[in-house]
Every structure is written in structure tokens, then in C-alpha cells.
Amino acid sequence: GSYLTQVGCYTNAPAACSLNMLNLPVAGVYSMVLTPPAGTTAFSGSVSLSADVTGSFTLGTTSAITIARNGQNALYSFAGTAGQQLGLGLSAALTTPAAQIIYVTVFKPDGTTLGSTSINGGATAAVVYDVPALPVTGTYTVRINPASAATASLNVLLSQDATYTLSAGAAALPVSTTGVGQTARLNFTGALGQNLGFGLTGITLTPTNTNPVSVVVYKPDGSYLTQVGCYTNAPAACS
């Protein structure tokens, strides 16, 4: 038969590996050949083959996802609109063995990658991923892939960005987010050569967190301009 894919599996902890076989090209009987390294006199292990855990995300609703079999993945879908700004919140992640990486990849309707993030099962409290602006209207998919054939559970929240409009010289604008994964998107109109300053004050986080609020500024074409990290320690402000 013709070649499909492969992986190398090592005995260093956790002495496990996984291999994703996506979109099988034909129906029929496939074969997998497991070849121990040269010089090995014996090989043993346990193998399993699993279909993806499937489901769909609803904006603003947390999905509790369990991946109960070694080597298994989860594949969830959501309906998106061109230009939509979304965030993915990952929390309460646990893996067996502990502290394995869970990879999360977002795919466009044509199957190409839009973006990706990850969370460490049991070692990271939560991850907020600002999904790139959706390029087309259609059905997007999110693949959740625990490393090293780990089993896993986590909560995933898909959120619409909280959107605000800023104006230079206007009164301070209250901004807030709700739920893990939601981001605040502040839009403003700038002129060529204009000099502007940004200030954020009265920062609070629920629950209390010593990590900063990340403020990233993008140009009109979507490329990066500048950024700052804002902390809650006194005076709980940044510029």
C-alpha cells in the first residue's frame, strides 16, 4: 500500500505517543507497522484506535470536554461570519499522565489552519486565545489534541469580543469582559503622523491574578504596531 503518515515513539516518560490520521483518503483496510529500533530484542505496549469526540460550540456557553481514550482527539465546530472577532477560553484542564500539553487548533471552513494555542493540563490555570478575525463565513472546526496519548478533560468557552470605540480627547470609557476567553477590542480612528497616548486605570481581575492584562495595538491592515502589559498592583494602571 502507499504511505499515509508516521510517528516515532520513545520510551522516555510518559513512554507514550499518539498519531493523528485526518481525513482518510479512501475507504478500505489500512495497516500500521510498528518497528522496534535496531538492537531491540523484544517490544510490548498497548494500542488503541479511536474516533474523535465531536460536538459544537455555542457562543457564550462553556463546553465541558472529556477525551477518555489514549490517542483520542476532540473535534468541535462553530458557525462563523466573515470579519467576526472571537476568543477561546481554556480552563480546568487536566491530563493523565499529569501536566501534558493539550494542543488546540482552529481550522477554516476549507480545512486550512487559522490559528492555534495550547494549555498544560494541571499546570496552567487558564489560557485566553484571541482568534484571528474570521476570513470567511462558514463552519469552522476546533481540534483538541492531548500530547503523548494522554487522556484529558477541559472547559472551553467561545466568546464574541466585547467591542468599544475610543475617541481621542473623550471622557474615560469603562470597559469589561465576562468569562474566560473573552477579550475587549477597542477601535479608534488615527491620522497619518498623529501622536496618541493610551491609558488604562482602575484595573481589577476576577479572581485575583498577578499576571498582566495584555494590550496589543494593531494597524488598520491587521499587522502589529506596539503593546504593553498592565498590572493590578498599585496604582493598577498603565500607559
Image (cartoon, helix red, strand yellow):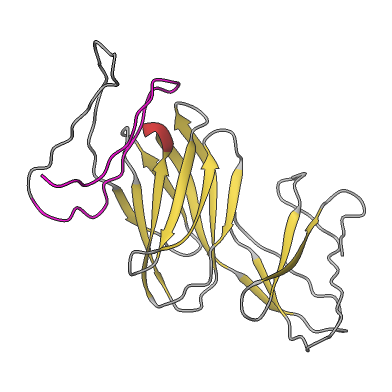
**Quarter that holds the C terminus:** bottom right
Residue 214 appears at what percent x and percent y? Answer: 72, 58
The residue lying toward the viewer, choosing from 195 and 178, is: 195
Q: In the orientation shown, which residue stands out farthest toward the right?
A: 235
Query: How many numbered marks have been drawn onto this rendered protein structure?
Result: 0
Residue 13 appears at what percent x and percent y? Answer: 45, 21
For image coordinates 52% across by 31% down, the residue present is: 99
Q: In the orientation shown, which residue stands out farthest toward the bottom?
A: 191
Residue 53 appears at what percent x and percent y? Answer: 30, 47
Q: In the orientation shown, which residue stands out farthest toward the left?
A: 28
Q: Main secondary structure of the magenta part?
A: loop
Q: Is residue 37 above or below residue 2?
A: above
User: Is residue 4 inside the magenta stretch?
Assistant: yes
Q: Is residue 130 above or below residue 117?
A: below
> In screen coordinates, is 125 left or right of 215?
left
The residue lying toward the viewer, choosing from 2 and 232, is: 2
User: Is residue 119 inside the magenta stretch?
Assistant: no
**Quarter that holds the N terminus:** top left
- Residue numbers of the magenta segment: 1-27
For image coordinates 9% across by 52% down, the residue present is: 27
Residue 219 appears at what percent x and percent y? Answer: 68, 77
Tell me the quarter of the picture where residue 125 sits.
top right
